[in-house]
Image: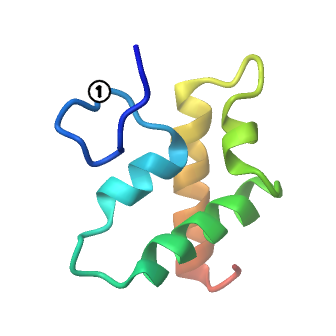
């Protein structure tokens, strides 16, 4: 495969950040996406969320779990 823009109709697989870019409605300010990335970084306690995602042995379920953790932290006001 080759790299494409996350919002491209040809995209079939997203990284953790690319998925956020696509999930936040285009009508939202960019800060909404940035806030979500910061929340994920805090949830995994890592500076580089993509490096965390790409770590050897990382599973899709690990990534889904960290989204859930970031959402829970945001809802609890602990970000």
Which residue is painted at 70% across and 81% down in the image? 78
**What residue lies at 50% left-to-right and 38% top-to-bottom?**
15
Q: Is residue 27 left or right of residue 24?
A: left
Q: Quadrant of the N terminus?
A: top left
Measured as percent of width and height from the top left, residue 9 is found at 17, 37
Residue 40, horizontal then vertical, whole percent: 63, 60
Tell whether 72 sits left or right of 7.
Answer: right
Q: Is residue 50 above or below residue 36?
A: above
Q: Residues within 10 Å of mark 1 (few under 14, many from 20)?
A: few
Residue 74 image point, x, y percent: 57, 77
Q: Say how many tags the image has.
A: 1
Q: Point out the image quarter for the C terminus.
A: bottom right
Nearest to the observer: residue 77 or residue 41: 41
**x, y percent for residue 75:** 52, 79
Front-lying residue, 50 or 65: 50
Q: Residue at x 42, y 56 (%)?
A: 20
Q: Residue furthest left?
A: 9
Nearer-the-camera pick, 10 or 35: 10
The residue closer to the viewer here, 13 or 72, is: 13
Is 43 situated above or below 60? below
Q: How is the image coloured?
A: rainbow
Q: Which residue is mark 1?
A: 12
Helix, strand or loop at label 1? It is loop
Q: Is residue 61 above or below residue 51?
A: above
70 displayed left or right of 51:
left
Q: Quadrant of residue 34 in the image?
A: bottom right
Q: Quadrant of residue 51?
A: top right
Name the residue: 53% across, 27% down: 60
């Amino acid at each position: 495969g080759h790299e494409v823009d996350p919002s491209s109709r040809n995209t079939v697989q997203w990284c953790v950040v690319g998925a956020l870019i696509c999930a936040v409605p285009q009508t939202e300010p960019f800060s909404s996406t940035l806030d979500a990335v910061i929340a994920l970084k805090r949830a995994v306690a890592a500076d580089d969320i993509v490096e965390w995602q790409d770590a050897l042995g990382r599973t899709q379920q690990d990534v889904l779990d960290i989204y859930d953790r970031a959402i829970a932290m945001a809802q609890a006001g602990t970000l």
